[in-house]
Amino acid sequence: MIGTAQAFSSRYAQARAQFLDAAAAAGLPVESHPHPLPGRDGEALALDVVRDGPADARHLLIVSSACHGVEGHCGSGVQVFALHDEAWRAKARDAGVAVLYLHALNPHGFSHTRRVTHENVDLNRNFHDFRQPLPANAAYREIAALLLPAQWPPTPENERAVGAFIAAHGEAAWQAAITRGQHEFPEGLFFGGTEATWSNRTLRQVLRAHGAAAEHIAWIDLHTGLGPNGHGERIYAGRDDADAILRARRWWGGGGATPVTSIYDGSSTSAFLTGLMWNSVYDECPRAGITGIALEYGTVPVLEVLQALRADHWLHLHPEAPAAQAEAIRQQVRAAFYTDTDAWKQRIVEQAREAMFQAVDGLAAPA
């Protein structure tokens, strides 16, 4: 067994080493998909895949981390702890549920303390049919010039203009305009891309290989950055299907103790989003039933999160920025998505473990 705090890592390279060591200790092979670029410190990057359970299992639970790179500090800790948790592994094994751990879907962002991929794409806005017209985000277009000013920190004039928008339209409208996803400004925030990213293509390959035999797939995708500090919101992740939403609420709702929210009915802290990653499992595993949530852990207030992302994208556009300023911005981004305290980590693991147990019970229950 490993201590809760010890399961978390301060750098991608350490997180990957811990994950690989945990898999080895559990006697499980690792399937690594190397990323084409090196990490911030020159380290090798990869999407690492570990399957705990038979290849022909009818029921499959996916637990994934670092869709948004820097959020991997949290997700990796959950995965490392789970691989050391024999009671959890026995629970899944005895129920006939195979568990597929996807470590660092976006390893480049994890290593470089960025939320986006090396293509500057928000991976969770990148799952579209790019042969079709892409959704427009007129609200983002209205504020695009405000988001990335010529200098950082922003001038008082820029801050007044941002404040005026929020005063006129509300904080929720500011969040929604920025986070929904956009395909018009490649250097901007929450850019969904104009083609499938490396992470998108690689994930689809993994899903085809590991989901082919499954009759029902549950997916817990681990995120941070929305909601009260340490609280894990269970956000339904799937098509706008009443039966699937009801099933997710039955599995993960805890009789009302741990409610499942939705972007479709406005109950989530998340705005309505486009191009979400769960689209991939419907495409690549069409014969399986799908039930999923994003487990979204709170860190700091949402305006602080958005400010950190503005700073990060400004820095991406200004590599000439002084080293001290660049490091301060990276620390700001890390703090926006990872609360580095033992108490926070304990709460993260407790809630993830509960959700994983609930998923196994749901998968194993009669249809």
Image: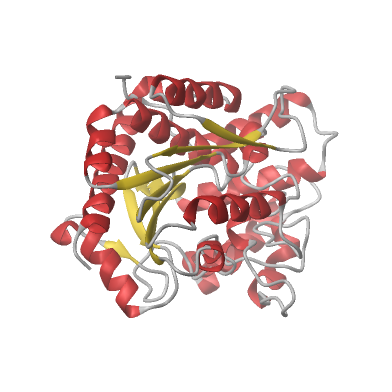
Q: Is residue 70 left or right of residue 230?
A: right
- Residue 252 in view (yes/no): no
Q: Position of residue 161 (x, y in %)?
A: 66, 63
Q: Position of residue 269 (x, y in %)?
A: 40, 61
Q: From what the image shows, is residue 253 above or below residue 114?
A: below
The quarter of the picture where the C terminus appears is: bottom left
Instruction: In this rendered view, identify the residue nearer to me: 214 or 38.
Output: 214
Residue at image coords 33%, 65%: 261
Residue at image coords 65%, 40%: 109
The count of marks equals 0
Quadrant hosting residue 112: top right
Residue at image coords 16%, 61%: 256
Residue sitting farthest toward the left = 255
Q: From what the image shows, is residue 183 above or below residue 66?
A: below
Q: Position of residue 142 (x, y in %)?
A: 70, 72
The quarter of the picture where the N terminus appears is: top left
Q: From what the image shows, is residue 343 above or below residue 291?
A: above
Instruction: In this rendered view, identify the residue nearer to me: 270 or 40.
Output: 40
- Residue 228 in view (yes/no): yes
Q: Is residue 182 left or right of residue 4?
A: right
Q: From what the image shows, is residue 199 above or below residue 325?
A: below
Q: Position of residue 70 (x, y in %)?
A: 57, 39
Residue at image coords 72%, 22%: 41
Q: Is residue 289 left or right of residue 359?
A: right
